[in-house]
Amino acid sequence: MHSAILAPMSVPWDSELDEVARASERPTYNTAAVENQTGLRPATFRAWERRYGFPRPRRLPGNQRLYSDRDVAAIRWLHRRTTEGLAISHAVQLLEDSLTAAAGGGPPNAGRSPAALADDLVRALLAFDASTAERLLSEAFALHPTEDVCLRVIEPSLVDIGERWHRGVVSVAAEHFATTFMRRKLFALLNVYETHRGRRLVFTATAPGEWHEVGILMVSLFLLRHGLGVSYLGPSLLSDGLAETLRGQRPDLLCISATCEETAEKYADIVGVVESLPPPRPELAYGGQAFADPARRATVRGTYLGSDAAAAVATIERLLNSKG
């Protein structure tokens, strides 16, 4: 049993790029060896070579390729960035720029801060410019850990747009476009990391009638990246049939999110279902803007997740560790 909160899985991108820049350029490995070292199919990195000019293997008579340690390190870096959601064309450009800077004796360009990226992202989304928004998020995921992008780029962007909508400054259509864009991105990341059952099983959902799911999607993503098994049950989880699902799947924890008073009140329906089950029951946890008031939290059952997705992971780790 893990007794402490696991460190985020992201490795600082500049450290990885330093590894690429320091690696030998002497051609050593054939294609099969590269596949063995990177876990990537040769068709993939050959396509990168053909379309984007990277990697750059040495060609021998008979057109056989030999790859260097730098090629192998670069393929690993590109694979990690595309797994995190970065477009391969953008990843290659960042790699090329960084290697050029390193060759010139200067440090790789650290890129824009999360705050600057968030500002640009808001402008792109309000202009319904999906291609620019995609490029900005790709840049963010390449330069910063996934957790930082979620908490310091995506979340503040949506809060900013939501506040403008409440003031009547932006349209409902713009707010919906931005939210839908972010949901698609988070679902894509969930698909990347949801490849195996983790050490414990957590169900996540929003309360009955609650359709704002970005917050609970972030929690789900962070938990997957911390090695927990997660099944996201979607928005507006209804109590009908829930007892049967919980009895059959036996999750360790059920996490529910609500953003407004009305849906927070319906959280009681979920509590009723869980408390009707015979032991062992899943633990219950809740979060979202609706539960920011301590007075409300004092009236409900379960464990409060905290103010954001990072706090939720810490709370869930403690809760599951105490459960044994």
Image (cartoon, grey):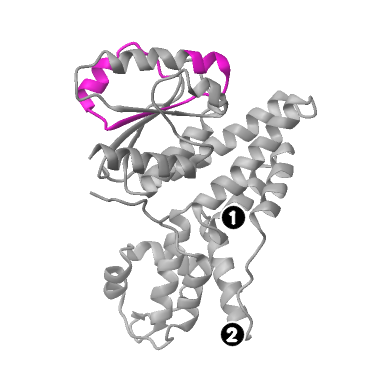
Is residue 227 inside the magenta stretch?
no
> Does dot 2 land on a helix, a strand or a loop?
helix
> Does dot 1 land on a helix, a strand or a loop?
helix
Q: Which residue is label 2 attached to?
A: 103
2 vs 1, front mark: 1
Residue located 29% across and 50% down the image = 3
Residue located 53% across and 55% down the image = 87
What amino acid type is highlighted by mark number 1? Ala
Mark 1, Cα crowd under 10 Å, few <14 / some 14-19 / many 20+, is many
Would residue 299 be seen by someone viewing this image from the given angle?
A: yes
Position of 27 with respect to 289 (left or right) is left
Residue located 66% across and 36% down the image = 159
Residue placed most toward the observer, 140 or 264: 264
Residue 110, position as x, y percentages in the image: 62, 68
Residue located 41% across and 44% down the image = 314
The image shows residue 94, relative to residue 197, as above or below, that is below
Residue 204, position as x, y percentages in the image: 39, 30
* Numbered mark located on residue 140 in the image: 1
What amino acid type is highlighted by mark number 2? Ala
> In the rendered image, which quarter contains the C terminus?
top left
Q: Which residues are magenta?
A: 237-265
The image shows residue 12, relative to residue 20, as above or below, that is above
**Mark closest to the chain's N terminus, 2 or 1:** 2
Residue 234, position as x, y percentages in the image: 42, 26
